[in-house]
Amino acid sequence: MNKFRLTINALAIAIFMLAFASMAQAQATRTWVSGVGDDANPCSRTAPCKTFAGAISKTANGGEISVLDPGGFGAVTITKSITINGEGTLAGILNTATNGVLVNATSTDNIVLRDLKINGGFNAGVFPGGVDGVKVLAAKSVNIEDCVISNQQIGVEVAAGANVNLAIFRSIIENNSAAGVRVNTTAGAARASISNSEITNSAFAVHAKANSSVSVFETTIANNTLGVFAEGQSGPALVVVKNCSINNNSSNGVQAGGGGSTTTSTVRLSSNWIVGNNGAGISIQAQGFVDTFLNNELKGNNPDGCAACVNITASFQ
């Protein structure tokens, strides 16, 4: 009888260890997708998956999904630390009527999106067809590197409920009906950095809302409705803009306050070229404040500066 029980226990342990080994094997540190792959595959280099959604369930926390060849790899929801790397090929996401990348991870997770083309296209003939190119609900950090995000309602949106950090490098964000980049959190602080990028043909190019701090460097903000907008709602908004070109926007180049602002809405400007906007180069409205460093160039706006406004803490030059 005891021998029988020992045999059963040994068998149970063996089954458990086999199951655990199978689970561990299914979570690879690097997985692959291909335009001719199959999500039933293990997502290895020789047997790649077809979609990012198929690969992410087989990728370990902190791992990387790489792209073998050109293709459209579908929308994806990210709930853990991961890198999606499209370097060297066309790594596309067509996200008609949905979000391209939805990040809903934990406060310790770091996400990298590299060299992706996220296109909302048309939805039943309506343009733009996408909802958000990248939407961040929760994470420690999200880095967007060398991406093209187009034809969305919002190109990149932080809509968080706690601390989160966003960084956008060398990316193009274009043709978005509501905003190019919008940053907002209901608690904690949402911090964003945008550098060496282009934000064009959108409603608000850079839109900072509640509890947000956004820094923009070496970036072109052109042909939008409104270029830079700090709109503190139920929490302060701060935008720091340095060495940027803000031009040919159909309304104001820079606006601090106004809209739905209920709290401090601040823009700090240094070494920017603010030219040819159909509205004011710089507009200060309710709850708005602007700091400058005496080195901005304003020309051909309507009007250039905001001489009648009272919340300018340094002279324009």
Image: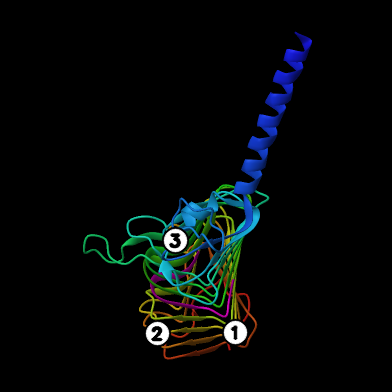
| Residue 40 location (% of width, % of height) | 46, 50
Mark 3 or 1: in front is: 3
User: Which of the two residues, 167 or 256, is positioned nearer the viewer here?
Assistant: 167
Residue at position x 37%, y 55% in the image: 98
Give the CA distance from mark 3 to mark 1: 44 Å
Task: Find the magenta span and give its range.
Answer: 194-207
**Lateral position of residue 89 relative to residue 276, left or right:** right
Residue 214: image quadrant is bottom right
Q: Which amino acid does label 2 sit on?
A: Asn
Residue hosting label 2: 248
Residue at position x 51%, y 59% in the image: 47
Magenta stretch, main secondary structure, is: strand
**Lateral position of residue 316 relative to residue 16, left or right:** left
Q: Which amino acid does label 1 sit on?
A: Asn
Q: Residues within 10 Å of mark 2 (few under 14, many from 20)?
A: many
Q: Quadrant of the C terminus?
A: bottom right
Residue 132: image quadrant is bottom left
Residue hosting label 1: 243
Q: Is residue 66 above or below residue 200?
A: above
| Residue 34 location (% of width, % of height) | 46, 65
Give the SS element for disc 1: loop
**Lateral position of residue 177 relative to residue 3, left or right:** left
Q: Which colour scheme is used?
A: rainbow
- What numbered label is drawn on residue 74? none
Residue hosting label 3: 37
Q: What residue type is labelled 3?
A: Gly
